[in-house]
Image (spheres, rainbow, N blue to C red):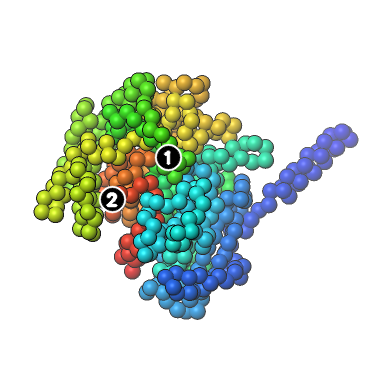
Amino acid sequence: MNKIFSVGLLIFLITNALQAQQKSYPLTFDSKKYQTKTLTFEGKSFEVRAYENIVYVSNPVDTTYQKINIYIPEAYFQGKSINGYTAKTAPIFYPNKVGGYMPAKPGTTEPDRMGMMPPLNGEVPANNAPKPDAKPQTNQAPQVSTVVAALANGYVVASAGARGRTTKDTNGIYTGKAPAGLVDLKAGIRYLKFNDKRMPGDAKKIISNGTSAGGAMSALLGATGNNKDYEPYLKEIGAAKATDDVFAVSAYCPITNLDHADMAYEWQFYGINSYKKGGPFGGGNSQAQTLSQEQINVSEQLKKAFPAYLNSLQLQDKNGHILSLDETGNGSFKELVKTYVIASAQKALDNGKDLKDFKFLTIVNNKVAAIDFDAYLNYLGRQKTPPAFDALDVSTPENMLFGTKTIDKQHFTDFSLKNSTVNVNKADAAIIKTMNPMYYVGQAKTTTSKNWRIRHGEKDKDTGLAISIMLGTFLENKGYNVNLELPWETTHSGDYDLKELFQWIDELCK
């Protein structure tokens, strides 16, 4: 009897100790806990209240990343207006800093590589933004923080951190594999909506924003609002009891639709057998290399598989005609891709850009009349080896994204699993689904955002042009408002056209 009592007491004490360690965080916004910051934008100073490092869930897994920074112009506490907005009507700009599906801390008022715009005098082009490890160059004008620019435009800014593919707990268990990062960003939105009446800003008008993997996260937030697939994860971390749909989506070069991105990449780049690694997460430029015969064979197989997927989507053009590809990869969808590149060149031409050196363009009477698409792709060049995302040796960031609590890397396509050079499994189909917005757009019991702005640089080769064009066309076909462009001579980057972005937001919100 004494032994039973002792064991019971020990269990009781251990349980109490564990509960004491698992601190529960309040979900009510405290308007009194802030610091006043004086910021400067375009030569004008203004004050904001900075509510930083707020844990946005009651049962966090990692308080390094599961925090949100909220910045509110002081004018709204004084009954004043900015850019026509008041404390009740100001939209909430929701930028994430996710890159490469890595963990990301919340954005601040300081410039950083996932939240910069070029100086307004145009001295530093968007596609020359510094690499992650680059040292500041003293001959360049200082970068402007996206957060500061948004605040100056009258928005409330809230930026949530999120776990990522490398996040571990103290026991070495992975805590940031898919869909953890997206779940965290959803929880941040729920925190804002839960506290809508306690703080300035209109939580019915949250605009998500992100670049690269962060662009994919932004697209996912827009596509998957309130879908039950994420509910168990949100409940586990103690997300606030509120909705998580967003009003509008801004997505720069979204690395998304991962389970079909390998096929789309090879449909675009098949036949281009030299490559040069690069990109903001590729460790800088390298010497040009040549695909092996085995890689060329893989490229051919993936290219041949793409038309079947594209045709299965039953996409339509603006006249209601089905967009398709034949077995060779040619067809009306390819013509649609061409029109987006031509439109990009035409906009550059209209803005005074000299395009005479781009020999793949046919320009007649100051109009871009045609494009030699093969010549354009050779000018663009290949950056990734096949498969670009689900590597046969599971060496990509995306392979890490689809790991588990105890497995670092897994496949997420049948093709790579079948042809794998390592002994690993394929991620669970339900998990793969949670990271692809195409599965959720317009689905029942899902609140998909009505407003979308997608930008994929015309010179961006981190993923295929088809990825953003398929997403944009799919959304248009479902009746959503889509603004999709491929900015000329722009590589893999974001936040390079904030004036235009803010104009788009203002047109939606005023």
Which quadrant of the rendered structure holds the N terminus?
A: top right
| Residue 366 rendering spot, x and y as whole percentages | 14, 54
For residue 83, which quarter of the picture?
A: bottom left
Q: Nearer the viewer, residue 111 or 335?
A: 111
Identify which amino acid the numbered label 1 is placed on. Answer: Asn
Examine the rendered structure and indicate whether residue 403 appears above or below residue 489. above
**Residue drawn at x 31%, y 45% as measured from the top left:** 459
Secondary structure type for disc 2: loop
**Residue drawn at x 80%, y 44% as measured from the top left:** 13
| Residue 503 rendering spot, x and y as whole percentages | 32, 64
Q: Is residue 402 visible?
A: no
The disc label shown at residue 466, or none: none
Name the N-terminal-most of marks 2 and 1. 1
The disc label shown at residue 488, or none: 2
Judging by the rendered image, the residue that carries numbered circle 1 is 285
Q: Nearer the viewer, mark 2 or mark 1?
A: 1
Secondary structure type for disc 1: loop
Identify which amino acid the numbered label 2 is placed on. Answer: Trp
Q: Nearer the viewer, residue 86 or 164?
A: 164
Please indicate whether residue 463 sits to the left or right of residue 314 in the image. Answer: right
